[in-house]
Amino acid sequence: MGLVVQKYGGSSVADAEGIKRVAKRIVEAKKNGHQVVVVVSAMGDTTDELIDLAEQVSPMPAGREFDMLLTAGERISMALLAMAIKNLGHEAQSFTGSQAGVITDSVHNKARIIDVTPGRIRVALDEGNIAIVAGFQGVSQDKKDITTLGRGGSDTTAVALAAALDAEVCEIYTDVDGVFTADPRVVKKAKKIDWISFEDMLELAASGSKVLLHRCVEYARRYNIPIHVRSSFSGLQGTWVSNEPTGDKVEQAIISGVAHDTSEAKITVVGVPDKPGEAAAIFRAVADAEINIDMIVQNVSAASTGLTDISFTLPKAEGRKAIDALEKAKGSIGFDSLRYDDQIGKISLVGAGMKTNPGVTADFFRALSDAGVNIELISTSEIRISVVTRADDVNEAVRAVHSAFGLDSDSDEAVVYGGTGR
Amino acid sequence: MGLVVQKYGGSSVADAEGIKRVAKRIVEAKKNGHQVVVVVSAMGDTTDELIDLAEQVSPMPAGREFDMLLTAGERISMALLAMAIKNLGHEAQSFTGSQAGVITDSVHNKARIIDVTPGRIRVALDEGNIAIVAGFQGVSQDKKDITTLGRGGSDTTAVALAAALDAEVCEIYTDVDGVFTADPRVVKKAKKIDWISFEDMLELAASGSKVLLHRCVEYARRYNIPIHVRSSFSGLQGTWVSNEPTGDKVEQAIISGVAHDTSEAKITVVGVPDKPGEAAAIFRAVADAEINIDMIVQNVSAASTGLTDISFTLPKAEGRKAIDALEKAKGSIGFDSLRYDDQIGKISLVGAGMKTNPGVTADFFRALSDAGVNIELISTSEIRISVVTRADDVNEAVRAVHSAFGLDSDSDEAVVYGGTGR
């Protein structure tokens, strides 16, 4: 009966009814004997409305002021939530990120937490209060300016507070029941995962699963804070993310799930001289434009020309910037042309069991082949295989792989490995 | 070309267009060589919308959380205003009340400013920035909690900052052209006042004029900060409020204006024993309920019964509370009954010239009498006469008095005094 950090997203507190519902759930945890710290996002569409206002007054809103603006959203939801809890007869106090001791660097709009000093939260808890903390925001160490943490920042706030307060668990409440073996909108037979390791969750998050962001899971793994992802609309158990399996029945699955991602594009640099330093020059140009790339593949050089092609994937949103950066560096790098393709998708199979089960890769390719899906790029890690296909093939590919690995919910059989090389 | 504090109300920044218009005006002041500090209210109806949300989650929103909620409003307007100014090519930084050093007591929802330590504002100005400060809010000295200053709090923020920064002037931008000799909605011939003394402005504010609140004028008088009330929609000069007349042509008028107020009610305590301590007991009971009363009158005691009646006026909103407090104390005070009347209105004539011009009072009563208006209560100060009448008579009474004292705009004549006793 220790300390619990609960995080509620914008869809859980979209209106007054949602806030009252969430307040009841928080009070239940308190009644069960827990000390409760709640991290809350802005209500429903508030953030989008504020962004819209900003764009009306300025085409390029400045970082510092943009953060000041956006943090109004959590201020509203947290104050309302504290009021709703008080109305149920329990004591609650709300705290801004700054008041809660969330110290960040000074990179506005995507600041990183560098320290958490939750002295006021401790005092509030010791006095018997429920503490409500604004997600997504902090205060910069050097200038004492208000900062925001960027996309998924509220989850990171929750995990960081849980770590600083040595919480038993960080509960992430959302509008889905947990983490699934595949996106249930694509795979009807996708199953909720009861437990998943930090490592597998990190790979799923990096491969397109949207339930938890990579950064939040990374933080939880570093401080060994168990995360419980669950629905704020039901009382069901969700998905536990931790180092060790929780519960009696839970065993580590060979395959955790299938993720997909259609937010990337592919750029192919055609006719690159096959000599040392060429690839480095290309990726230096892209990195200097502050673009994160994902997969890379270099074709075998054609002996006759001494030229090769290099392809890589990157977020579609950064496609224009990458093309511009490469065109600018064309003279010094020396290549023929660029090809841009945003009709691609990525399918990833994730599971720590791959390490000890040769044959997973072969089965993966077989499933894709049986489904008539053509593979354009391949990349692997110790516990993940990813392929790039045509965007149109992605949904079919995900379903085929999900089924082939016995993940469909009406099947109790899991695939047994012992086979022929991975 | 010193430091100017400008304050813009909610109607001036009601939407993105309003914010852009205000930004242009601020930049003009900066271009004219001023250092500029801007205090801004929440956009248009934002505060009402937030109050509505609060009432949906809790019938009695708590003080601390209610303040946390409401301060989100200024956070939005100030950030947007800073963005709009930057978009015009000038540097601007926004600051919360706390960041601006507005230190208050801990009385949530109606905190009082006890100190202003604008260190960060000074730095921002010295670096060439325009400083945008959230009105209406501060931080409590003891608990470091967010507080709000109550109604008209943004004007007080502006004057307090002007005092702390030793500003040349505090400009209050609003949706009217300045302070008028009467409410222009009631008196079509009301004239804009070019200059008015702090004292007369204090009496007008206390008597129902809504343009500036008493508390803000009181603060300005104490620190001798000239206030310039003007429209944010036009470039016209407004009304100067200060110790000494400004400009060549301006002279102190004998009568500054006529104010009226229909927000009060009258309570009559009937059958009070006419002995020492009775009135004190009545007003102690009312004061203990934290009710501010305005006018008081005690009738001459009827010799036959030794009983008298005591009447007083108070805000209508507090009528119920006062009746309850008096009923509760009925046994110990000893009176017959209570009468409650909320169909009253108050008309006040204000002007420092009264002190040296006997006859003003007589002319005032003559004007009311000629208009057929019956007087129920009278109270006076050195520079003000107020009467209570039927609510239905108020508009007619205001017009009659305004005209009788030569305040109508098509008349250049002022009334000359030299007459027979006041």
Image (spheres, coloured by chain):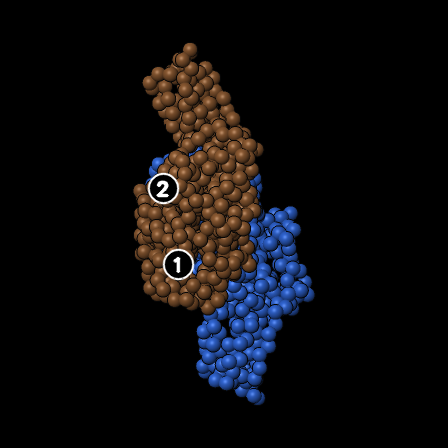
Chain colours: A brown, B blue
Residue in the foreground of this view, choosing between A26 and A229: A229
Residue A337 placement (x, y as % from top left)? 47, 17
The local secondary structure at tag 1 comes to loop
Residue A136 placement (x, y as % from top left)? 42, 47
Residue, x 58% and y 71% (percent of image)? B266
Tag of residue A248: 1
> Which of the two discs, 2 and 1, sits closer to the camera?
2
Residue B74 seen in render: no
Q: Quadrant of residue B297?
A: bottom right
Q: Which kind of residue does numbered mark 2 sit on?
A: Thr
- The chain ID associated with circle 1 is A
Q: Eyeballing the image, is B372 above or below B179?
A: below
Q: Which residue is mark 2?
A: A356
Residue in the foreground of this view, choosing between A182 and A335: A182
Which quadrant is the N terminus of chain B positioned in? Answer: top left
Q: Which kind of residue does numbered mark 1 sit on?
A: Asp
Residue in the foreground of this view, choosing between B43 and A26: A26
The local secondary structure at tag 2 comes to helix
Residue, x 57% and y 79% (percent of image)? B338
- The chain ID associated with circle 2 is A
Residue in the foreground of this view, choosing between B310 and A378: A378
Residue A218 seen in render: yes
